[in-house]
Image (tube, helix red, strand yellow):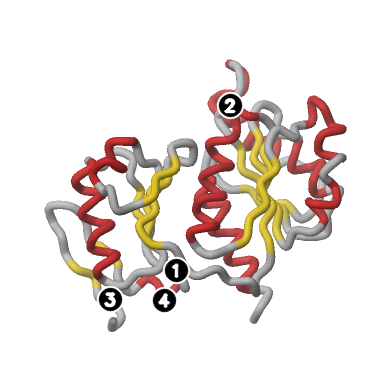
Amino acid sequence: MTSGDVRPRPDLARLDHDRARRTGEPEVVYGEHKSPTTVATLLGELVAGGSVPVLATRCSPGHAAAYPAGEYDPVARVLVARVADPDPGPGTVVVACAGTSDLPVAAEAVAVLRAFGIAVDLLADVGVAGVHRVLAETDRLAAASVCVVVAGMEAALPTVVAGLVACPVVGVPTSVGYGAAFDGLAALLGMLNSCAPGISVVNIDSGFGAAMVARRILLAGRR
């Protein structure tokens, strides 16, 4: 494809078939607020265009039913039409989530990383309310090339993890929590104000965003 090769679909979207050449990763479809027919059509066009991987995030069972050729994770809400070959070179990403309520966001990060061929180790329910749980997983955390840490409420888990490991930590605040959590704003501010170095923070509930940051960190380490 030449630069700027974007097929116009004024009825649906303008797919960017040249993105992989420019950025190293193809366009990913955001499924929420799109009809099942639209998502299925876009996935089909990306498959036909040779994109690797091909996936859509924030998908419902209706989206999955409209594209039966894909593999759907109902917890992650990710619909995968084509995966990349496993790449043993970049390293392993540990995705750790504070509570089971944070698991959908963590699962989105896991599903996206695996679609891109990245090895993932998931640690669930290791929040600081029982700090022994995360301390018991210190060896698995320390073996990671990147840690993605997902937490709501006061979101202290990334700070704890960053104090245990030498690798970059990507914090993902979630909208989990009671009223003063302000739909994830408290978690976001808590992560941004962490006293531990080496933490970057993505948007609230953005498991996808964290996965892509982690992937680029891994690839940058090979240059």
Name the residue that disc number 3 marks. 4
Identity, as a three-letter code, of the amino acid under mark 3: Gly
- Element under label 2? loop
- The percent position of residue 75, horizontal first and vertical second, equals 48, 36
Identity, as a three-letter code, of the amino acid under mark 2: Val
- Element under label 4? helix
- How packed is label 4: few (under 14 Cα within 10 Å), some, or many (20 or more)? few
- Give the numbered dot on residue 49: none
Of 186 and 126, the residue lying toward us: 126
- Element under label 3? loop
Name the residue that disc number 2 marks. 176
Give the spatial CA distance, label 1 vs label 4. 8 Å
Name the residue that disc number 1 marks. 25
Q: Residue at x 55, y 68 (%)?
A: 86
- The percent position of residue 95, horizontal first and vertical second, equals 66, 48
Name the residue that disc number 4 marks. 22
Identity, as a three-letter code, of the amino acid under mark 4: Arg
Is residue 147 something that shows in the picture? Answer: yes
